[in-house]
Image: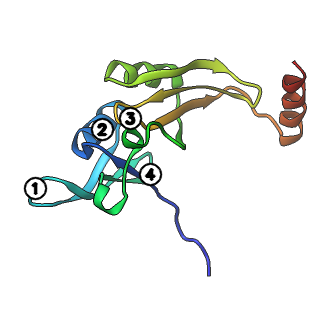
Amino acid sequence: MSIHEVFAYLRLRDAGRAIAYYRDAFGATEKFRLTEPSGRIGHAELLLGGTTIMVSDEYPEMNIVGPQTLGGASSSIHLHVDDCDALLAKAVELGGTLVRPAADHFYGERSGTVRDPFGHEWNIGHAIEEVTPAEMQRRYDELMKA
């Protein structure tokens, strides 16, 4: 058996608003959505840079809840982009909360983190240099000494 693809699946309060936010902030394209007669979104797929992200509204009756219900995110999604500073600023302008401002890091990337209005965290970064795993470890060791 082999794995063919891996998808992030985000559970949200108000998936419709989240889809609009992801479209406006990150340029996501909605592939399709399945909506209940009540308006609750049971499943939607978004395309971000060639990768599919799945989203749904919360289903507390099935123990499917998002970070707002849980009191925080337990994971994050990393977007590798051309200009992290610009995308972080746009995500914040559209209602996200800056968790970690953009900075240059030892592993060869400039990145920062934004929490979307629905509680999910997005690490947004761009490459600033090529760093081998051995050099990355050396730099990490130095950082941990400090």
How would you rate the neighbour count of disc 1 (Cα within 10 Å): few for under 14, some for 14-19, many for 20 or more? Answer: few
Quadrant where the image shows the C terminus: top right
Q: Which mark is residue 50?
A: 4
Mark in front: 3 vs 1:
1
| Real-space Cα separation, disc 2 to disc 1, in angstroms | 23 Å
Task: Look at the numbered disc 1 and give the secondary structure of its residue.
Answer: loop
How would you rate the neighbour count of disc 4 (Cα within 10 Å): few for under 14, some for 14-19, many for 20 or more? Answer: few
Q: Earlier in the sequence, mark 2 or mark 1?
A: 2
Name the residue type under label 2.
Arg
Name the residue type under label 4.
Gly
Task: Look at the numbered disc 3 and give the secondary structure of its residue.
Answer: helix
User: What's the colour scheme?
Assistant: rainbow
Q: Position of residue 33 (x, y in %)?
A: 23, 57
- Reading the image, the residue beneath label 2 is 23
Q: Earlier in the sequence, mark 2 or mark 4?
A: 2
Name the residue type under label 1.
Ser
Where 88 sits versus 41, above or below?
A: above
Q: In this image, 93 relative to 106: left or right?
A: left
Task: Look at the numbered disc 4 and give the secondary structure of its residue.
Answer: loop
Q: Earlier in the sequence, mark 4 or mark 3?
A: 3
Mark in front: 2 vs 1:
1
Q: Which mark is residue 38?
A: 1
- Reading the image, the residue beneath label 3 is 26
Q: Residue at x 30, y 38 (%)?
A: 23
Check contact, mark 2 vs mark 3: CB within 8 A: yes
Q: Position of residue 14 (x, y in %)?
A: 24, 42
Q: Which mark is residue 64?
A: none
| Real-space Cα separation, disc 2 to disc 4, in angstroms | 14 Å
Q: Residue at x 83, y 41 (%)?
A: 133
